[in-house]
């Protein structure tokens, strides 16, 4: 009984000692992708994915794309669509997500970081204020995004 108690207590004591000595730093990051994206302001710029008509907003912490007159955002296993970046966002079937959007590589932020950033005000004038112009064409496959 004493040995079991010591085996349980020893790791806790060692952990406390390690935390109390020197300058220990710990950081915990937790990201849960559920629900539609929450956007509090307009993007600062838009970037076109080369070879497509898909744009992304590099200033957001969530994946937000513009294509075919709609804003698109994957969150976990779900996709959302809105006619304005600020919402309202609605869940769409995965098959309704346009192939061009679905095919954007998962590491697009890094891959396209040096592409031309178009100031949002200029981009907005050229793209009809980001309002919807009709549904996108789906392809019936899973979430590709280069994975």
Image: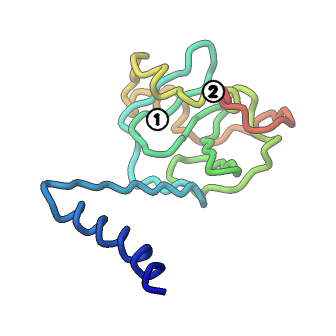
**Residue furthest right in the image:** 140
Q: Secondary structure at mark 1?
A: loop
Question: For the residues marked 2 and 1, what is the alpha-carbon distance in whole angstroms?
Answer: 13 Å
Colouring convention used in this rendered image of the protein = rainbow
Give the residue number, with chain letter if any, for mark 1.
57
The quadrant in which residue 54 appears is: top right
What is the x, y in percent for residue 55?
54, 28
**How many residues crowd around disc 2 within 10 Å: few (fewer than 14), some, or many (20 or more)?**
many
Give the residue number, with chain letter if any, for mark 2.
104
Q: Is residue 126 above or below residue 87?
A: above
Task: Say whether residue 28 is left or right of residue 21.
Answer: right
Residue at 64 percent of width and 36 percent of height: 69
What is the x, y in percent for residue 81?
66, 48
Q: Secondary structure at mark 2?
A: loop
Q: Are marks 2 and 1 in contact (CB under 8 Å)?
A: no
What is the x, y in percent for residue 140?
86, 37
Task: Compare residues 147 and 94 and report the one nearer the observer.
Answer: 147
Task: Say whether residue 50 is left or right of residue 97.
Answer: left
Q: Nearer the viewer, mark 2 or mark 1?
A: 2
């Amino acid at each position: 009984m004493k040995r079991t108690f010591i085996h349980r207590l020893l790791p806790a004591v060692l952990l406390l000692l390690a935390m109390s000595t020197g300058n220990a730093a710990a950081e915990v990051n937790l990201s849960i992708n559920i629900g539609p994206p929450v956007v509090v302001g307009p993007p600062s710029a838009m970037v076109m994915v080369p070879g497509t008509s898909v744009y992304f907003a590099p200033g957001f912490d969530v994946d937000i794309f513009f294509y075919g007159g709609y804003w698109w955002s994957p969150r976990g296993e779900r996709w959302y669509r809105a006619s304005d970046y600020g919402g309202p966002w609605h869940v769409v079937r995965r098959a309704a997500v346009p192939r061009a959007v679905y095919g954007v590589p998962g590491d697009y932020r890094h891959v396209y970081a040096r592409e031309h950033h178009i100031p949002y005000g200029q981009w907005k004038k050229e793209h009809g204020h980001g309002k919807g112009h009709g549904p996108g064409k789906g392809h019936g496959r899973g979430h590709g995004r280069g994975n």
